[in-house]
Image (cartoon, rainbow, N blue to C red):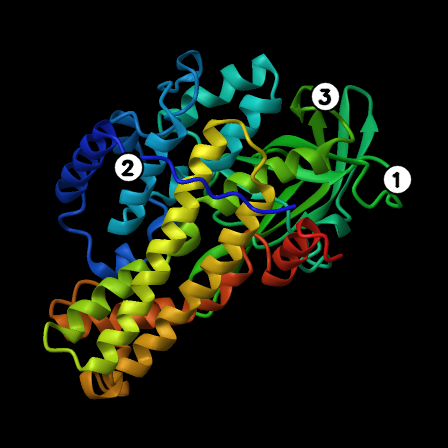
Amino acid sequence: MSFRFDIPPNAQHLTDLRQEVRGFLAEAMRDIPAEEAARSWHSFDPAFSRKVAEKGWIGMTWPKQYGGHGRTVIERYVVIEEFLAAGAPIGAHWTGDRQSGPLLLRYGTEEQKMALLPATAAGELFFCIGMSEPDAGSDLANIKTRARKVSDGWCVNGAKIWTSNAHRRNYMILLCRTGSSEERHGGMSQFLVDLKSPGISIRGIRNMANEHHFNEVVFTDCFIPDAALVGVAGEGWKQVNAELGFERSGPERFLTSYILLRELVRQLGPDAPERARIAVGRLLAHLVTLRSMSFSLAAALEAGRDIASEASVVKSMGSEFEQSIPEIARDLVDLQALVPDDEMDRISPAAANDTAQTYASVLHHVMLHAPSFSIYGGTREILRGIIAKTLGLR
């Protein structure tokens, strides 16, 4: 087998849409500093999400009867790319728009779609992902959380971890065992879980930046009604892999560190030494290549193609690219000369009002978060295993 990255031609209506989004962002992000922009899809700003919804840019590809706008996957890609390049605070609606909504459209019941999708497209209802577990490492097939069938529903026990913003979201799409634990890729199912349900405990996990973004979500005899089953019981593995295709192929796979790259170029200035120009040129070449590959997968999704293998390539290469930016930035600019160590702790988004302080603040933020880039959405080892299998090497 081989990989396909067929790049679609550009079109005037996409250029017009891009300009419309840039105009909106110029106004909506006027008072958002660079360090906050560096958070982008890891932020949580429901008010901003509602503004985006008013423009019709959440649920863009969904049918209109579910609150969507019937636009193309490529049009959505253009909007998301502009949001990420600007560092827009789109984290609140991110998961629902990117994967939970499309998953429900594909596998959900009519009642589930009507109950949840219009509010999601309006920026009023938010989802989180219930996949990773404390003892499973990066092996999603090794999950232990179990849903046991009871009268009129299911009883869930277990835990999920690294659940982004679970303490602020309304619903989780939960992957758990419903069949034999000996079935490695079988016996799994997905459920819609109201996070206010009894039997759910959400425990915050602070990261290296001392931010509460991640959570451990513990289920203790949590009852989930039959109507909450997504798709077919026992086919959760197939469904979750379709969901991961959305998660691994988008521009967030290579634009998470983009604000730092932008600030690095600004800090170096027009008189940057040759060594710096060569390094930045290489980064831009990688960026353009990844962008072309990712853009091609938007067209593949539009055509209904299975992109699981190609998405793994984009995610693996994108993670390496994103993690390389802070290391190259540290090598090219002497941060100590710009901002001494004893002043770093006093830099805040509001105080970062000159080029040097802004650069130092953004670099500090990205450096602390960069280790996670190669973990979320699938670790590098898991992705390379998928790639090797596609090529017939395992």
Residue at 49% across / 59% down in the picture?
317
The quadrant of the picture occupied by the C terminus is bottom right
**Which kind of residue does numbered mark 3 sit on?**
Asp
Residue drawn at the location 43% of the way across and 16% of the way down: 63
Q: Height in image: 135 above or below 235?
A: below
State left or right for residue 365 relative to residue 18. right
Residue under the image location 66 percent in, 31 percent down: 191
| Type of amino acid at the residue the image marks with label 2 | Ala
Q: Residue 226 carries which label?
A: 3
* Horizontal side of residue 385 vs 333, given as left or right: right
Tell me if 47 is positioned left or right of 272 in this view: right
Q: Report, in whole angstroms, how far the alpha carbon at label 2 lies from the one at label 3.
A: 33 Å
The image shows residue 281 at horizontal and vertical percentages of: 27, 68
Q: Which residue is drawn at 66% across and 45% down?
A: 1
Proximity of marks 1 and 3: CB atoms separated by less than 8 Å = no
When asked about the image quadrant of residue 14, the answer is: top left
Q: Nearer the viewer, residue 124 or 284?
A: 284
- The quarter of the displayed image where residue 16 is located: top left
